[in-house]
Image (cartoon, helix red, strand yellow):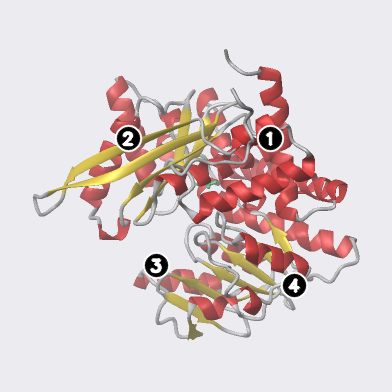
Amino acid sequence: MSENTGTLTSHLWSSSDLYRNAVLELQEAAETMKLDPNIASRLQVPKRAMIVSVPIRLDNGSIRVFEGYRVQHNMTLGPGKGGIRFHPEVNLSEVAGLAMLMTFKCSLVGLPLGGAKGGVRVDPNQLSRQEAQALTRRYTTEINMIIGPDKDIPAPDIGTDAQHMAWMMDTYSQEKGFAIPGVVTGKPIEIGGSLGRAESTGRGVVYTIQHAAKHLKDTGKPGPKMDGSTTVAVHGFGKVGAVAALEIHQLGTKVVAISDVHGGLYNKNGLNIPDILSFMGKNRTFVGYPEAEAITNEELLATPVDILIPAAIDGVITAENVGRVKATIIAEGANGPITLPALKQLEERGCFIIPDILCNAGGVIVSYFEWVQGIQNFFWSEREVNAKLAEVMENAFKKVIDVRSHYNCGMKTAALIAGVDRLNRAMLLRGLFP
Ligand code: GLU
């Protein structure tokens, strides 16, 4: 048999931009760190994937069948871990790419977990609560043979939240005959969730921004002071972006722009984030908030700010719009928000990128804490959770900085190398079966 050249990725996986981007970034990291080519080619494809049809009865009595996926990319370090995405454009390739990012994220921050991801191709905004529940329960049943507290542990992602996790936990537990809270994380507190989990991703984003600002200062580079002179724009004012905006506002910086799918808000003197959140509590949207100008998502990305937090979805900063992006720090709150060509331009320009697998790792770190608390049936205070989160994020940040100076590479490549290195050693130790 001829040798594996290690560069070909099958068409089945590679149809999405997100997956191709992830593979190209992996290849760059592999080349930089001179990774064993056998390991490099193995990591380009997932271990296992499941495609399921999810039929549900709609409120109007008709039946509709949705397509669902669960991809387990690598489980060398422990059970698979990763969210469930409900989005109209989700597909097998994208879920595979996101599962790959989870592998490197869990490895980088030192968790005993592998990488996985799931999704259902559906617009969650079109579903009633009853339909969302039916979809979540049937999807859980269809994938129940590959998930479990020791096998693969889902969590929320775009379009899903603690309520979806409660339905997943209940469905899985009903089928087994007893309560199994450890099958998912990101659950409501009442059924075994962790304090601080809901805020953890946004909080972690802000921790990494603080470390980045300090790092720039310590190394004599121009960077934000993290006071009233510092301006921030947040793209995606949802589960991650809204928390990050609030936390960074509370530090005393000026959040001048926010946006979501409905549009954006701008105020050069700084937006009053707590006031916007209470406006949203009453009106369900920030559109129409009086103390700001309305802006578009594209205008937000081009706003002259010190820090930009793309916290919505992948592929937002592209070769087409990167020329208009002016921020000096970009914190990737979402998974894959900067395309590879855009990343190269930003790096050449000296922009400090906080890579997604580091920046948004707070979510999976506190998911891990939730899983550990559940196994022990011993729950921690929110202060304890936050302190442990801060410690893990600080160590991961330092690790990426060390790798970057060792290889003299970009932050994105450094984060991947740090993740791949730990995994590589584990894979070599475990060896190839049979
Ligand atoms: N969906 C989140 C992520 O992309 C969290 C995953 C988890 O908590 O397992 O990291």
Q: Which residue appears at 39% of the width and 49% of the height?
A: 91
Mark 1 or mark 4, which is nearer to you?
Answer: 1
- Report whether the residue tagged 1 is closer than 8 Å to ligand 1: no
Numbered mark located on residue 281 in the image: 3
Task: Classify 393 as above or below 348.
Answer: above
Q: CA distance from mark 2 to mark 1?
A: 28 Å
- Report whether the residue tagged 4 is closer than 8 Å to ligand 1: no
What's the residue type where badge 3 is placed?
Answer: Gly
Location of the C terminus by quadrant is top right
Q: Is residue 423 visible?
A: no
Q: Secondary structure at mark 2?
A: helix
Q: CA distance from mark 4 to mark 2?
A: 46 Å
Task: Classify 372 as above or below 238.
Answer: above
Q: CA distance from mark 1 to mark 4?
A: 32 Å
Q: Secondary structure at mark 1?
A: loop
**Badges 2 and 1: C-beta atoms under 8 Å apart?**
no
Q: Which residue appears at 40% of the width and 78% of the height?
A: 287
Q: CA distance from mark 3 to mark 2?
A: 31 Å
**Which residue carries the number 2 mark?**
140
Q: Earlier in the sequence, mark 4 or mark 2?
A: 2
**Which residue carries the number 4 mark?**
227
Q: Which residue appears at 54% of the width and 72% of the height?
A: 273
What's the residue type where badge 4 is placed?
Answer: Asp
Q: Earlier in the sequence, mark 1 or mark 4?
A: 1
Numbered mark located on residue 110 in the image: 1
Numbered mark located on residue 294 in the image: none
- Other residues around mark 3 within 10 Å, as few (<14) / some (14–19) / many (≥20): few
Q: Secondary structure at mark 3?
A: helix
